[in-house]
Amino acid sequence: MSDYDAGAIAPDASARTPAGWRARPPSPPRPYFDLADAVSSATVGREEKGLSQLALAKRADVAQAYISEMEAGQKKNPGIETLRKIAKALGVPVTELLE
């Protein structure tokens, strides 16, 4: 049995770090979601349901100003919890907003 951790990558003369071990390969990229699409989907969903910004805000328990700023492009990265609230208020899964 070797004397190094089984989870570590063995030393390699061609690619050494100061500790003498190769760096782990980078993690695969995370899926990228364009939140502008989510905002656009929320706006379309709101309009399809005939809801005003105020009505959606009340249903989602977020400020009407926040909905307005999202739709105007001033809030480019709404949090996932906000998206969940909006999706629930629209009666759609969050994934539909991210499509």
Image: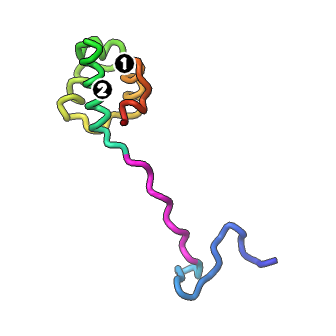
- Give the labeled residue for mark 1: 90
Q: Residue furthest bottom?
A: 13
Q: What stretch is highlighted in magenta?
A: 22-32
User: Residue 64 versus residue 86: which sits nearer the camera?
Assistant: 86
User: Residue 71 versus residue 99: which sits nearer the camera?
Assistant: 99
User: Residue 85 versus residue 36: which sits nearer the camera?
Assistant: 36
| Residue 89 placement: quadrant | top left
Overall secondary structure of the magenta section: loop
Q: Position of residue 37 (x, y in %)?
A: 29, 37
Q: Residue at x 22, y 22 (%)?
A: 65
Please tell me the numbered disc located at residue 33. none
| Residue 69 placement: quadrant | top left
Q: Is residue 66 left or right of residue 95?
A: left
The scheme the figure's colours follow is rainbow
Please tell me the numbered disc located at residue 42. 2
Q: Position of residue 49 (x, y in %)?
A: 29, 14
Secondary structure under tag 1 reads helix
- Dot 1, how many residues are within 10 Å of its Cα: few (below 14), some (14-19), or many (20+)? some
Disc 1 or 2, which lies upstream in sequence?
2
Tell me which amino acid carries mark 2. Ala
Say which quadrant the C terminus sits in. Answer: top left
